[in-house]
Image (spheres, rainbow, N blue to C red):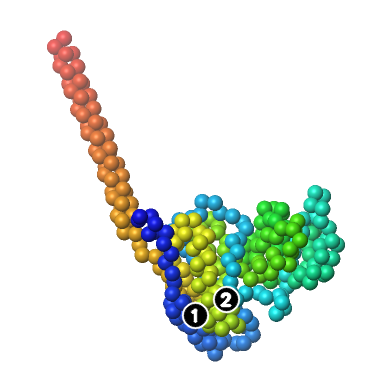
Amino acid sequence: MAEAAAEAPRAVSPETVGKAVKALLKWKDAQSNIQKPQLLGDDELFYLIVTLKKIPQNPRVNPHKIPLPHPLLDPSSEPAELCLIIDDRSKSGLTKDAASKKIKSENIPISKVIKYSKLKTDYKAFEAKRKLCDSYDMFFADKRIIPLLPRLLGKQFFKKKKIPIPVDLKHHNWKEQIEKGCASALLFLSTGTCSVVKVGKLSMGKEEIVENVIAAINGIADIVPSKWSNIRSFHLKLLDSLALPVYQAVPDLRNETNSGSGAKRKDETKTDSALKKKKSKTASNKLGTADKKKKRKTLAGQ
């Protein structure tokens, strides 16, 4: 029964999120008045930070896709640069020409097609990787080569959360898969307890941002191991702002007490062990001294 209660959803209220969004928008307006216009981004993002209690045991390269009611990127209504990396190895059966023809005939919103072989040869240098990363809003790749990409793309793609989204190019529904990727928040569960998810844009209305944040929070809670019982906190921020809390788990005092008692017992065990060793050593020394005195008396009697 207690375990079931721990798994129960703890809904974050739209009012709490709304207050955080309002405060961040107010902070942004104040910054706009004191900074030069050219130093400000045209469309700054809202970031949701999730902090877990325990590190995921099985981190993965592929991001989890969380559908958002208001897409961060909508190629059908706004300019977007999307890049598709295809598997052109001999067994894949796909060529760049064939991929380009399909993209054009089906009006798929892909700006650039890069072959896997080209990625290996032309983008070895750090500067080339950096330029590639900065040239496109999102990257997609044939799911067959996804495990091979982190080593080729480098840290810049991880830092900017632009790791390619896997698509199954064996299926005919390329457009549907790519549009779904554009309409999703991407959750990267790595080797730490903190993950950052893009959830909104300044160009959106306040209510749209709030709805996206709530959708992302609920989606994350469904994805992470142990769900809500493993979530320590959610914070919302802009790029250079403070992170405002929108959810904080109540500390489990019982676990902390048990943990403290366990540590205390370990310390007591170590102390007892040390005392026993000390007593044993003292007794051994006394016995050695007594033996020496006995030997001296025996020699004197002779």
Q: Mark 1 vs mark 2: which is more N-terminal?
A: 1
In which quadrant will I find the N terminus?
A: bottom left
Quarter of the picture containing the C terminus is top left
Say which amino acid is labelled 1. Answer: Val
Task: For marks 1 and 2, give the CA distance.
Answer: 10 Å
Residue at 28% in and 45% down: 265
The location of residue 158, given as percent across then percent down, is: 62, 62
- C-beta proximity under 8 Å, tags 1 and 2: yes
Q: Residue furthest left?
A: 301
For label 1, the crowd category at 10 Å Cα-Cα, with few meaning under 14, some 14 to 19 and many 20 or more, is: many
Q: Residue 38's mark?
A: none
**Displayed quadrant of residue 11:** bottom left
On the rendered structure, is 226 left or right of 178? left
Q: Residue at x 50, y 72 (%)?
A: 214
The secondary structure type at the circle numbered 2 is strand
Where residue 79 sits, quadrant-wise, is: bottom right
Q: Residues within 10 Å of mark 2 (few under 14, many from 20)?
A: many
Secondary structure under tag 1 reads helix
x, y (%) of residue 159? 61, 65
Query: Looking at the image, which residue sits at the far front?
Result: 1
Q: Which residue is mark 1?
A: 21
Residue type at mark 2?
Gly
Q: Which residue is mark 2?
A: 200
Left or right: 98 as drawn, with respect to 21: right
